[in-house]
Image (cartoon, helix red, strand yellow):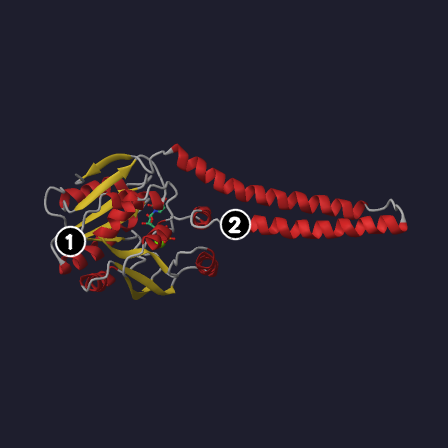
Amino acid sequence: MTSAPPPLLSIVIPMYNEEAGMQLLFDKLLPVLASLTQHWDIICINDGSKDNTLAQLKAWHEREPRIKMISLSRNFGKEAALTAGLNYAYGQAVIPFDADLQDPPELIPQMVEQWRQGFKVVLATRKHRLGEGMFKRGTAWAFYRLMTKVTAINIPSNTGDFRLMDQQVIEVLRLLPERTRFMKGLFAWVGFSTTQVYFDRAPRAVGEPKQSISKLWRLAKDGIFSFTTLPLRFTTYLGVLISTLAFSYAGWLLWRTVVHGVDTPGYASLMAAVLCMGGVQLICLGIIGEYLGRIYRESKKRPLYIVEEAAGIA
Ligand code: UDP
Ligand code: MG
């Protein structure tokens, strides 16, 4: 209960169908926390799991009341689940953590140490990505590069959600009202004095990755479209370029007609021009549509997640 003084450390774990790995997770995590302090809590968010995650979390809470649980009414996605967890994380330092043990709990003492030195944010940066395919590594690399290029904020590459944040940072994050939660972007956007510790990212301990390719694609789009309007400017530049070419071509056509008279053939060039222009216009409409859709979603002001039940949360 939060009537007690706030814990020193809160760990926030979003969980979607993670029953298989839960035992291992707590077996690894609890000793690390115990070595640091007694005043910790773990906030698990059951993100609409279809397996026994919820029942197991309740059982764990019975055994160890410092393991707390929020259960969402359906699957809202990792970013929403994490937001939910951070909203209930009152530790002086807060660490989001993946249930699959891809991030090593052994790193937590180092992170806490850096935080005690005065840093408000301690990033855990991967040296290597073990157990992830070429495709995932390649796309992740390309995405981070693109993000740094096109957005004003600097999203550190090879850094996931695994990081320590001071409660002061969490308070600021709670104030950010947007529905589109690209957490890595928001984390980077708020700033604060930051340092890094390094580690090797392990393959998933148990089970399959729960973030499907389509979820990751949506996440990548969220990253771009909610942090920069560059695609919109790109449509302007594209328009200027194409208009310039079109006017030059039109001038040339006019000159040719005046000098050499009318010649009828021209089906191929006409068709090519019409189709290309059609395609370019649809792309530009699509880009505008991305922003419009986002404005629409924000304006509805629906809650980011719905809590169905909770245990140990004030
Ligand atoms: N997760 C979630 N909701 C989802 C998808 C994933 O809460 O809709 C959780 C999942 O249980 C895990 C964490 O988010 O604790 C990271 O998921 P995963 O390991 O599948 O993704 P990746 O390692 O690729 O980021
Ligand atoms: Mg994972």
Disc 2, SS = helix
Q: In which quarter of the image is ligand 2?
A: bottom left
Tell me the CA gap for discs 1 and 2.
43 Å
Q: Where does the image place residue 129, in percent across and percent down from the top left?
A: 38, 63
Q: Nearer the viewer, residue 54 or 215?
A: 215
In the displayed structure, 31 sits above or below 284; it is below
**Residue at position x 75%, y 44% in the image:** 271
Q: Quadrant of residue 57?
A: top left
Task: Report the quarter where the N terminus lies.
Answer: top left
Q: Residue at x 18, y 62 (%)?
A: 116
Q: Which amino acid does label 2 sit on?
A: Pro
Q: Is residue 196 left or right of residue 289?
A: left
The label shown at residue 219 is none
Q: Give the residue drawn at x 48%, y 42%.
A: 291
258 or 280: nearer the viewer? 258
Q: Is residue 280 visible?
A: yes
Residue 23 visible in the picture: no
| 89 horizontally vs 123: left or right | left
For the C terminus, give its image quadrant. Answer: top left
Of all residues, the one furthest to the right in this rendering is: 261
Disc 1 under 8 Å from ligand 1? The reply is no
- Residue to which mark 1 is pinned: 8
